[in-house]
Image: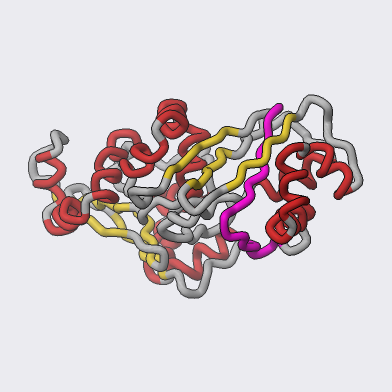
Amino acid sequence: MKQNPTALTPIYEKAWREPQFKQSLLDNPLATLQQEGMTFPEGLNFIAVAETDTHRYMVIPVEGSPDKSAETLLEYVRSKAMQDEAFKQSLLDNPKAVLIEELGQAIPEKVEVTVVEETGDTCYLVIPPQPDMQYVIERAWLDPIFKQNLLSEPKSTLAQIGIVADDNQEIKVKEETDYQRYILLEDEMKTQEGEENDPLTALKVKASQDNTFKQKLIQSPKQTIEEELGFTLPSWVEVEVLEETPNTSYFIIPHLPSEEEVESEEMMAVTGGWRRRWRPRWRPRVDIRIGIGIRW
């Protein structure tokens, strides 16, 4: 079955936030989907599987024709499997090795990959892993309605997809633009892997250790950044410093540049640190991604 992501989104969201519904999907997918108002041809059988951080599924569809203009590497692999019987069998027999070769990138050792093939009367429903903040960012980039809901009602919007904050936790969402950037001072400063040499991280660490410097950074962010890092930020860029507290968390939707946009070396140095703030204290998991731009 060629699944329509838009049609299945409410199903995934309900499964993410309601464990009993998810179990019902796994135990009796066809009846559960029909109860949700979805209709299917008579005689069609469903098999539902749930992905986890360490187990991903790839479905080779039976419907439709191979997509020769596949936009992603995984779509290309599926398309190739539909055209090449020998390749499809290799993919079914040894999916991880074949995918590593085709994608040209390593798959984490702890991640297991299962490839399944649909038939004329058997379809697979793959329930994606519980969303993380990377999913939220990507969906906000692609779905304007979701982004607006996230900005206006962040707590309830996140709860809708199964990301639940504590009752006493306030969540504020900010969106970066061409002209507005943010620095987030976390309540508990934690350096993420790969940020050790990031100049912005050094500023945030200094702010966490020196209250006088922190106040200076909050009150005059552009001037302080320029003094500390030794370069001039573009005049058209505004910078705001956000400070978390034990009861207030910020989630920042990073700016998504256009293909034509090329940022200056100075802006790249600063924004490099601003695009990895996807780990608030209430985040449920760290998503495992296989390859660049590929979500399983």
Residue in front for this viewpoint, 220 or 252: 220
Q: Is residue 89 visible?
A: no
Residue in front for this viewpoint, 95 or 262: 262
Q: Looking at the figure, which quarter contains the C terminus?
A: bottom left
Q: How is the image coloured?
A: secondary structure
Task: Look at the picture and state if 163 lies above or below 68.
Answer: below
* Residue 180 is inside the magenta segment: yes
**In this picture, residue 267 sits left or right of residue 16:** right
Q: Residue at x 55, y 65 (%)?
A: 100
Q: Which residues are magenta?
A: 179-195
- Quadrant of residue 5 in the image? top left
Q: Residue at x 50, y 62 (%)?
A: 99
Residue 198, image x, y percentages: 76, 56
Q: Residue at x 49, y 46 (%)?
A: 248
Q: Is residue 4 visible?
A: yes
* Residue 81 is inside the magenta segment: no
Q: Main secondary structure of the magenta part?
A: loop
| Count of labels in the image | 0
- Quadrant of residue 23 in the image? bottom left
Residue in front for this viewpoint, 25 or 167: 167
